Amino acid sequence: MVCDKQSAQCDASLLKQIDAFRQAASETLDPDLRPALGQYLTPLSMAIFMASLFSKIRKNLHLIDAGAGAGILSAATICAYLERKNPPSTIKITAFEIDPKLTDYLQQAYELCATVCRKRNVLFEFNIIKDDFINYAVNVLRADMFAPA
C-alpha cells in the first residue's frame, strides 16, 4: 500500500476517534442482551486486519455492513481504500444497526469518514438502516418473490 505521512496520520486519527466511540458505546450496552443482538463491536486491530483483506480495486465502492455497531470496520475499510495509489472516486455504505444506542455513534463515525473522503476528493455517501439485516433482507426477498409479474 502506498500512503503518505499526512494521510496515515489523518486515518490513524480517524480510526482512534471511531474506536473511542466503540469503547464508549460498549459501556452503554446491556451485557445480557449483547449476545442475543450479536453485538461484539470489532476491536480496532481486528478491523484494520479485516480491511486489509480487500484486494479488488474498484472505482466505485459500495459496502454493506450487516451489523455496523459504531462503524469501526467500515471506517477501517474506507481508510484502507483511501491509502491506495488509486483510491475509489466514490464510496457508499449501507449500514444496518438495530440498536438505537449505537446509531448515534455510527452517524458521528460516518460524518468523520465523510470529512476524510472530502479531503481526498472522494464522494462519500452513507445510509443507516435501523433494522436487523437478516429480517430486512428476508422481507425484501419475500416482497420480490410474491409481487405480481
Image: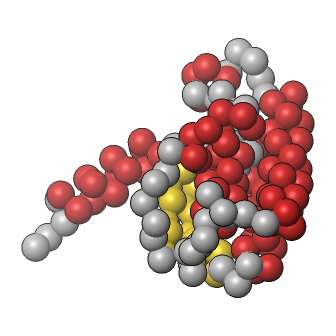
**Left or right: 66, with 28 as reference point:** left
Q: Is the residue 107 above or below the residue 98 in the image? A: below
Q: Is the residue 87 above or below the residue 73 in the image? A: below
Q: Position of residue 90 (x, y in %)?
A: 57, 78
Name the quadrant of the C terminus: bottom left
Q: Evaluate whether residue 112 shows in this view.
A: no
Q: Residue at x 51, y 59 (%)?
A: 63
Q: Residue at x 46, y 66 (%)?
A: 57
**Foreground of the two, 109 or 50:** 50
Q: Is the residue 79 above or below the residue 65 in the image? A: below
Q: Evaluate whether residue 54 shows in this view.
A: yes
**Foreground of the two, 27 or 86:** 86
Q: Position of residue 69 (x, y in %)?
A: 68, 42
Q: Residue at x 33, y 47 (%)?
A: 138
Q: Position of residue 80 (x, y in %)?
A: 64, 56
Q: Is the residue 119 above or below the residue 14 in the image? A: below
Q: Residue furthest top?
A: 32
Q: Quadrant of residue 86?
A: bottom right
**Foreground of the two, 143 or 58:** 58
Q: Position of residue 27 (x, y in %)?
A: 87, 28
Name the quadrant of the N terminus: bottom right
**Left or right: 106, with 64 as reference point:** right
